[in-house]
Amino acid sequence: MEMRAKLLDALGGEAGCKRLSAEFYARVGRDPILRPLFPGKSLRCATEEFAAFLIQFLGGDEGQTQSRWWLSLRESHSRFRIGPTERSAWLTHMRATLETASLDKETRKALRQFFLQSSAYIIGKETAGPEHKELAERWSEQRAMDDAIAAIAAGQDQDVLVLTPQFASRPSVFVGLLARMIQSGRPDLIRFVTDTVASEPGLVTRRFSGRTLLHFASGAGCVEVVGLLLRLGMDPNIQDRGGHTPLYCVANECALNVGADVVRALVQAGADVNAHGGVTRATALHMAARRGYVETARALLDCGAAVGARDSKGDTPLQRAINCRSDAVKRLLEERGAAGTRRLRDSQQR
């Protein structure tokens, strides 16, 4: 274990990883080749994610790895058009960053070699593994993780089941892999998830990318896993790092009609059907209206969702449905709104 922590310590711990990432992306922000790859106004997300990768890769505090969206390095870079020119520019800035960092000679050399080899891997070129003993071991684990994610995507379930158990000692990474299995919807992988969670209930509170398995299972419409997690005592109102509940996730992400069953399971377990979450302060009904998920919206209404709830802009779910041209949800909300008005009028006339 001492060997495995040596490189993280040499970098200055988690804080050192964050400094390295910030200094590197400050250079990227001025580069005419690399800056266009990041269309946002700032490079904050990229900086946080690279720091989280370094911390996770080097065995640091899992609580500081939650800015990661992807486990696979190749998958995380697939949205970019990266060729030899981009790689060369990336390496130029990384070398400059390492040269100015407070590192000993051995650490600087090892990291320079590692980034040279890993950047080649990302663009599809195979090279020899790192010479540094700790980096060689960690790189082997990263390659196995990439292979596991690729096997899930390719439907190679037997390979997935062989590769995944080796990450059980790394709960955050393990939860990320289980989440991808849930999202696949395939029976063998779902069975592996339920068996694993039933035998290791401590996983229910672990997170990857700031989300618990209940958030992932709800968003995927996986009734079986949702039910198991709730039976194990999972809080149905637990929030992810963005302030969203599992009910929000099903309304925002699950395009399947089974989303209605997930809604009912969560509400029966105590989920607040009118919880406002995130920056926009939207309810689950706002999100179902935006996405056009009519059966999910119907289930939310049946469970007491407020038709007149307003988000941070003052919009109701009906306004969301109109703005997003979700005609089926629009009609449903209009019908329920009219029915509610009639009930109110009738009660006042009695």
Image: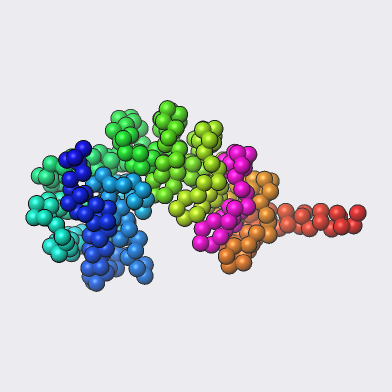
Please give left or right for residue 70 compared with residue 7 in the image: right
Front in this rendered view, residue 332 or 345: 345
Residue drawn at the location 31% of the way across and 35% of the way down? 169
- Residue 74 at x, y percent in the picture: 27, 49
Q: Is residue 44 magenta?
A: no
- Residue 178, visible in the rendered structure: yes
- Where residue 266 appears, as percent x and y from the top left, is 58, 41
Is residue 164 visible in the rendered structure shown here?
no
In the rendered image, which quarter contains the N terminus?
top left
209 left or right, relative to 313 = left
State which quadrant residue 176 falls in: top left
Q: How is the image coloured?
A: rainbow
The residue depicted at 18 percent of the width and 48 percent of the height is: 7
* Quadrant (top left/top right/bottom left/bottom right) for the C terminus: bottom right
Q: Identify the magenta region.
A: 259-288
* Picture quadrant of residue 50: bottom left
Q: Inspect the magenta stretch and tell me whether residue 270 lies in it.
A: yes
Q: Residue 228, percent across and down?
A: 51, 33
Seen in the picture, residue 109 relative to 145 is either above or below; the reply is below
The residue lying at 25 percent from left, 61 percent from top is: 19
**Percent position (x, y) of residue 310?**
63, 62
The residue drawn where x is 42% and y is 35% is 202
Pick whichever, 300 or 56, lies toward us.
56
Q: How many marks?
A: 0
- Position of residue 70 relative to residue 231, above or below, is below
Between residue 114 and residue 250, name the one nearer to us. Answer: 114
Q: Is 62 placed left or right of 333 in the picture?
A: left
